[in-house]
Image: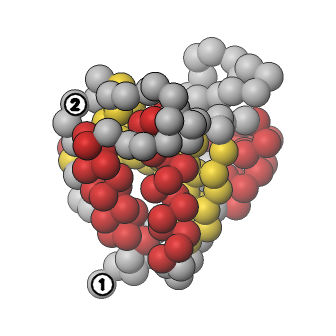
Amino acid sequence: MLLDPQIGENPRVSDGNLLLIGYGNPLRGDDGVGPKVVAAVEALRLPGVRTMVCHQLTPELADPISTARGVVFVDAAVGAGAEARALPLAPGGGAPVLAHAADPRLLLALARQVFGRCPPAWWLTIPAEDLGFGERLSPLAQRGFTAAIAEIQRLARPAS
């Protein structure tokens, strides 16, 4: 797992309430890796971790985002290299929120604008190469799946 150098020291959400949002289409191969990672983490029952799985990001997610101490968006990324990456996110503008799809930065901005709070956030991207029909992950996405779970466990672990 590569942590973006802009994050600086190892970030942790030490007092719980880490929200994981896994999104993608589980019927399109590697595109379903985000929901699969979040489902696997949910099965671990990590203390202080809440999970959500969705096909795409929608404006309604701004509410639970605003109440979290930290949020991790988990998604497949074609052409992202060979390793999963945790990139820091800041609220951002850009394209407007479409009827049923949004960028994580826009959801952070919406949480801040509507609910008055935007937590620290990361975009956990997992390399993807096969978006064909089916539920199986490619070997590349499977390696990213394993690395992503380890990174989420690290983020959720109380600071020592």
The image quadrant of residue 19 is bottom right
Q: Position of residue 124 (x, y in %)?
A: 40, 46
The furthest residue to the top: 95
Q: Is residue 100 left or right of residue 19?
A: right
| Residue picked out by circle 1 | 160
Q: Position of residue 95 (x, y in %)?
A: 63, 15
Between 143 and 95, which is closer to the camera in this rendering?
A: 143
Residue depicted at x 74% and y 20%: 98
Task: Say whether residue 144 is visible.
Answer: no
| Residue picked out by circle 2 | 81
Q: Quadrant of the C terminus?
A: bottom left
Instruction: Please tell me whether mark 1 sits on a helix, a strand or a loop.
Output: loop
Task: Say whether residue 135 is visible.
Answer: yes
The image quadrant of residue 97 is top right
Q: Position of residue 49 (x, y in %)?
A: 55, 71
Q: Amino acid at mark 1?
A: Ser
Q: Position of residue 88 (x, y in %)?
A: 39, 43
Residue depicted at x 52% and y 58%: 38
In the image, residue 65 sits, relative to residue 16, either above or below, namely above
Q: Is residue 64 left or right of residue 160?
A: right
Q: Is residue 136 left or right of residue 35?
A: left
In the image, residue 74 sits, relative to residue 51, either above or below, namely above
- Label 1 CA crowd tier, 10 Å (few <14, some 14–19, many 20+): few
Q: How many marks?
A: 2
- Label 2 CA crowd tier, 10 Å (few <14, some 14–19, many 20+): some
Q: Which mark is residue 26?
A: none
Q: Amino acid at mark 2?
A: Gly
Instruction: Please tell me whether mark 2 sits on a helix, a strand or a loop.
Output: loop
Between 27 and 105, which is closer to the camera in this rendering?
A: 27
Q: CA distance from mark 1 to mark 2?
A: 32 Å
